[in-house]
């Protein structure tokens, strides 16, 4: 465990690897969560030479991995490789018709291949860039967009007198079982937990309302959400003229929310999502305004003590 105090906040890295920033106060204990981990790949088998097999870690469609550059995280540093498959010139008609799986892919490691071991993880090596003045594209915006919103919220709170005991939790391992958030929520035992994650934007699903990028944060509603707090933050958004969207969830949200709300004897929980295009691909896309408006809403909500 590592701890440090800077200005008016306490910074702690717990045994699980969660980064927890506390803004001490004497009021209601409120914890905000955003996971810091990203989708990845695990090295599963060495073939011959510099060729290795991989499999997904967190849910990736193999079609988006073809011809991508990957960064391999070894015990002795970073190595790089490219994902290959059989060239179209050599493919039979049967192969062309086949659905691609990870059994059809391999990674060609271009340097330090001798340092790579079975079990090493790899991530996309794509660089973020601005599409225009409104949108940014890059890997792992699920959930770096939410982490940015938390950091901006922490900055905005300096403009308020805040009485609450506020925790900003940058949790680990959401993509492989939410164990980081479970650990942190059990430690903190907040009166209210607010989870920030992303949701599918600009896609029309027949049974759901269309969530759009640039139209503001998404307030999730469902059995894992505390309805009293949901109405409080919705009413506050209307008072502040913060555009918001509502997304219904069924029996689970597939986020840290599901586990946090049943920690200990139960924790009142909210889920706020940022609309995102192309989730779990090398280049996800978010609208910067959605991040800013999420932080603005949260800062006022926290300044009012969650009321």
Image (cartoon, rainbow, N blue to C red):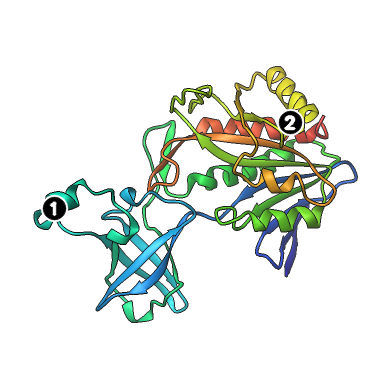
Q: Secondary structure under badge 1?
A: helix
Q: Secondary structure under badge 2?
A: helix
Q: Answer above or below: position of 198 versus 73.
A: above
Q: Residue drawn at (18%, 59%), measured in percent from left and top?
A: 86
Mark count: 2
Q: Answer above or below: position of 283 versus 125.
A: above
Task: Find residue 278 and report its image quarter.
Answer: top left
Q: Answer above or below: position of 71 versus 96.
A: below
Neighbour tally class for label 2: few under 14, some 14-19, many 20 plus, Cα within 10 Å: many
Q: Where is residue 170 in the image (x, y as percent from the top left)?
A: 64, 53
Residue furthest right in the image: 26
State the residue position of label 2.
Answer: 300
Q: Which of 187 and 242 is in front in this view?
A: 187
* Residue 304 visible from this viewpoint: yes
Q: Where is residue 88 in the image (x, y as percent from the top left)?
A: 13, 53
Quadrant of the drawing holding the C terminus: top right
Q: Residue drawn at (12%, 53%), measured in percent from left and top?
A: 92
Q: Which of marks 1 and 2 is nearer the N terminus?
A: 1
Q: Which of marks 1 and 2 is in front?
A: 1
Q: Are the residues flagged by discs 1 and 2 in contact, CB closer than 8 Å?
A: no
Residue furthest front in the image: 94
- Say which mark, if any, is on residue 88: 1
- Say which mark, if any, is on residue 74: none
* Residue 291 visible from this viewpoint: no
Task: Find residue 70 and report its image quarter.
Answer: bottom left
């Amino acid at each position: 465990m590592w701890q440090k105090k800077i200005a008016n906040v306490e910074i702690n890295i717990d045994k699980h690897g969660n980064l927890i920033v506390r803004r001490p106060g004497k009021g209601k204990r409120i914890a905000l969560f955003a996971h810091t981990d990203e989708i990845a790949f695990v090295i599963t088998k060495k073939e011959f030479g510099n060729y290795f097999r991989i499999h997904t870690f967190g849910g990736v469609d193999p079609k988006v991995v073809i011809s991508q550059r990957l960064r391999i995280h070894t015990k002795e540093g970073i190595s790089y490789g490219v994902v290959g498959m059989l060239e179209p010139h050599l493919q039979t008609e049967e192969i062309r018709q086949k659905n691609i799986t990870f059994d059809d892919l391999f990674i060609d490691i271009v340097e330090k291949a001798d340092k790579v071991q079975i079990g090493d993880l790899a991530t996309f090596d794509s660089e973020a860039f601005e599409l225009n003045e409104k949108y940014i594209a890059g890997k792992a915006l699920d959930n770096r967009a939410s982490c940015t919103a938390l950091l901006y919220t922490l900055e905005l709170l300096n403009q308020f007198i805040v009485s609450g005991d506020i925790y900003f939790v940058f949790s680990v391992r959401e993509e492989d079982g939410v164990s980081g958030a479970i650990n942190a929520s059990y430690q903190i035992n907040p009166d209210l937990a607010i989870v920030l994650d992303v949701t599918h934007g600009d896609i029309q699903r027949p049974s759901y309302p269309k969530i759009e990028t640039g139209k503001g944060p998404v307030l999730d509603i469902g059995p894992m959400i505390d309805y009293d707090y949901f109405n409080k933050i919705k009413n506050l958004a209307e008072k502040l003229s913060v555009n918001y969207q509502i997304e219904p969830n069924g029996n689970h949200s597939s986020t840290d929310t599901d586990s946090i709300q049943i920690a200990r004897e139960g924790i009142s929980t909210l889920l706020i999502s940022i609309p995102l295009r192309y989730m779990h691909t090398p280049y996800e896309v978010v609208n910067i305004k959605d991040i800013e408006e999420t932080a603005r809403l949260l800062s006022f909500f926290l300044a009012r003590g969650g009321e």
